[in-house]
Image (cartoon, rainbow, N blue to C red):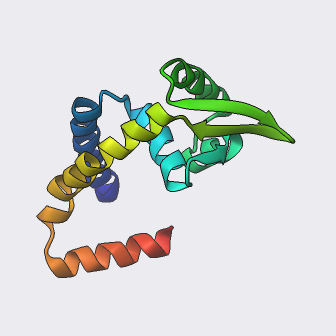
Amino acid sequence: MLWKRAYETVRAAVIADMTVASGLSEPELSVLVCLHDAGGVLRQAAIAAALGWDRTRLSHLLTRMEQRDYVVRDKVANGVEVALRPEGRRTIEASVPALDASTHRHLLDRLGPDDVTALRAIIGRLL
C-alpha cells in the first residue's frame, strides 16, 4: 500500500508538471515517450503491451494523435506500425528536459545519494 501511494504521489506531480510544460495529456505523453525510447517506430500491439492498455483505447488515442500530426500509422504484415512524425518528435524532444527536471524535483531530489543508487538498482531488477 505504501509503494502505491508513493508511486501515485510522484506520478501525479510529474504528470501535472508535464501537462503544463508540454500541453500533452498523460496518455499522449506516455505514447510519445514509448515511441521515443524505441527509436521512433513500434508496432501498435507493442505499445499497448508496454503501457498495459487495451488496444481499443490505444487505437482511439492514436487517431487523435494522428490528427495532431504527432504520429502516423501504417498497416504492415501482421499488424500496424506507429511512427513518430516530425511534430511528435519535436514535441517529445522538447519535453524531455522538463520531464527529467520534474522527475528529479518530485523523486530523486528528495532522496539521498545512496537512496538514488538503491532505487535505480531496484528498478533495474524489476524491469
The residue shown at (28%, 48%) is 99
Q: Is residue 44 left or right of residue 69?
A: right
* Residue at the extreme front of the image, as rendered: 86
Quarter residue 71 falls in: top right
Image quadrant in which the N terminus is located: bottom left
Q: Residue at the right extreme?
A: 77
Q: Nearer the viewer, residue 42 or 89?
A: 89
Compared with 124, 20 (above or below) is: above
Q: Nearer the viewer, residue 17 or 32?
A: 32
Which percent across, then down, holds residue 66?
56, 23
In this view, 43 is above or below 112: above
Residue farthest to the bottom, as pictured? 114
- Image x and y of residue 121, in percent: 37, 78
Q: Is residue 11 above or below residue 56?
A: below
Question: Where 127 falls versus 24 (above or below)?
Answer: below
Residue at the image position 13 percent from the left and 75 percent from the top:
112
Task: Identify the residue at horizontal 22%, vertical 30% (top origin).
Answer: 20
Which residue is located at x 15 percent, y 69 percent? Answer: 111
Q: Position of residue 98 (x, y in %)?
A: 23, 46
Image location (x, y in percent) of residue 35: 54, 46
Foreground residue among 91 and 110: 91
Instruction: Say whether residue 24 is left or right of residue 6.
Output: right
Tell me the quarter of the picture where residue 19 sits.
top left
